[in-house]
Amino acid sequence: MLKKRYFSANSVISAITALIITMMALIACLMVYFLSVLDDNAMKDVHTRVSIALAIEKEHLHKLTIDYSYWDDAYTNVLAVPNPQWIEDNYQDYLLPTYNLTYIATITSDKQVQLHAQRECLELNPQNIYSSAILERLRGSEPASPAYQAKAFFSEADGQVFLVGVEPYRRENDGVVVDGAHLVLAQAIDDTYLAVLAERFRLPKLSLVAAGEYDDSMSLEGFLPASNIATIYWSSPHIMNRVAPYMIVILLAFLIITVVLARLLLNKDFRHRAQYQEELFEAATTDPLTNAANRRYFMTLGKKEFQLQLLQKHSLCLIVFDLDHFKLINDTHGHAVGDLALQHFAKICQDNIRATDLFARLGGEEFAAILPKVDQDKAIELANNIRLAISDAPLMVKEKSISLTVSIGLACLNQEKSLQALLDHADKALYLAKNSGRNVVKVYQ
């Protein structure tokens, strides 16, 4: 006979310790890798969000410029018949503060600049508004120009950067350009604007000056895509720098604690643990007399099977068995024979049901079986097979034959919401079988 071979406790402890250290090193490497990936993704995410934020600001200013350039009253009171009071009421007192604009101007058809409204702190030469970026936009407004595209863009004037919208005045009814004059709405790109933008779109601190620790930037383009008016800078969040020191301390502490605990636990006797656990499981889930599942395990596993079949919309039947006149058997032949009768019955049932079915002793002489993916006709056939098998195979005790019969109640999943409801219906069918002369199969309707 071959002798069982066991590893020594020291070799197992050393192997487990080496494995733990290796795993911790791998975990540390993986965490560093994932943190670096998170940092890269964070940088890309911030860059994308800055781009989206600027695109939204451009679109907002462009739509605002379109709205006011299509206004007949604007052209009439600004160019056709200049009305200073109208300009002050609509541009200086309303449009400028409401939409946080920096200045509002008109470029006439002869390329003269009329400044209608501006912030009090702004000192701007009107003719300097006519920058190269705006000139490119005006050239793009020519009907035959292939460069024409309606959009807001960035421009520079007197050393300041602006987001501007430039659109020709048009008639409200047909959109025809009036006389080549253009409305200009502008917003200064300064520290205040960038701070508000960062807060609104949850961005890091933005700056037009490349001073400090900035690791990413974006060009602010003029009307033509290749023209660079200015550059904004920011620093993306770095998870690695914040997390790495704590991660190292935690991993080292976890490594030390894990190794110490593993060595302490593995020094104990761990032989027969699997066998012991299996015995515990069997004792907790199995009826010791019949080796069928006990009621607790039946209900626990049965509820899971019930929910699974309910979700998958499969059929499921539940059969309840009750040995007829079992008390008479106990009274006549003794409890030992009664136990043999229960074992005999359980053996016949287990021989007839599938391995995927759940068979259990609910208590006394009552048994039950859950049949997943079995319809009512097949369940009735199985129940009758078991009933006939019991009738045809009497219990033999010391060459004495003891006839056994069983009453069976059956219920199949229909509109029940729980296993208990299905079990109650099967019990009602069993009660009907008992009152119908016994040794029959009844189905809950």
Image (cartoon, rainbow, N blue to C red):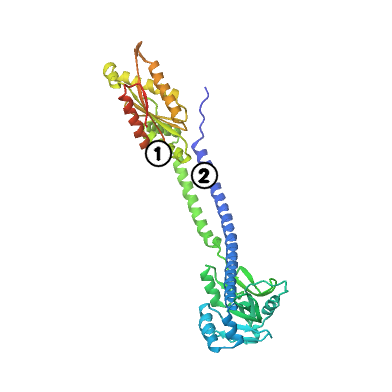
What residue lies at 57% left-to-right and 52% top-to-bottom? Answer: 30
Q: Secondary structure at mark 2?
A: helix
Residue count near mark 2 (Cα–Cα under 10 Å), binned few <14, some 14–19, many ≥20? some
| Residue 421 vertical position relative to residue 148 in the rendered view, above or below | above
Left or right placement of residue 109 versus residue 281 in this view: right
> Can the viewer see residue 171?
yes
Left or right placement of residue 329 versus residue 252 in this view: left
Q: Which mark is residue 415?
A: 1
Q: Which mark is residue 380?
A: none
Question: How far separated are the C-alphas under marks 2 and 1?
Answer: 55 Å
| Residue 264 vertical position relative to residue 157 in the rendered view, above or below | above
What residue lies at 52% left-to-right and 30% top-to-bottom? Answer: 5
| Quarter placement of the C terminus | top left
Whole-percent x and y of residue 294?
37, 31
> Can the viewer see residue 398?
no
Whole-percent x and y of residue 408?
36, 25
Q: Earlier in the sequence, mark 2 or mark 1?
A: 2
Q: Which quadrant would residue 371 be assigned to in this image?
A: top left
* Nearest-to-viewer mark from 2 and 1: 1
Closer to us: 364 or 267:
364
Residue matched to label 2? 17
| Residue 269 vertical position relative to residue 259 in the rendered view, above or below | above
Q: Secondary structure at mark 1?
A: loop
- Outermost residue on the front side: it is 173
Closer to us: 58 or 85:
85
Closer to us: 141 or 260:
141
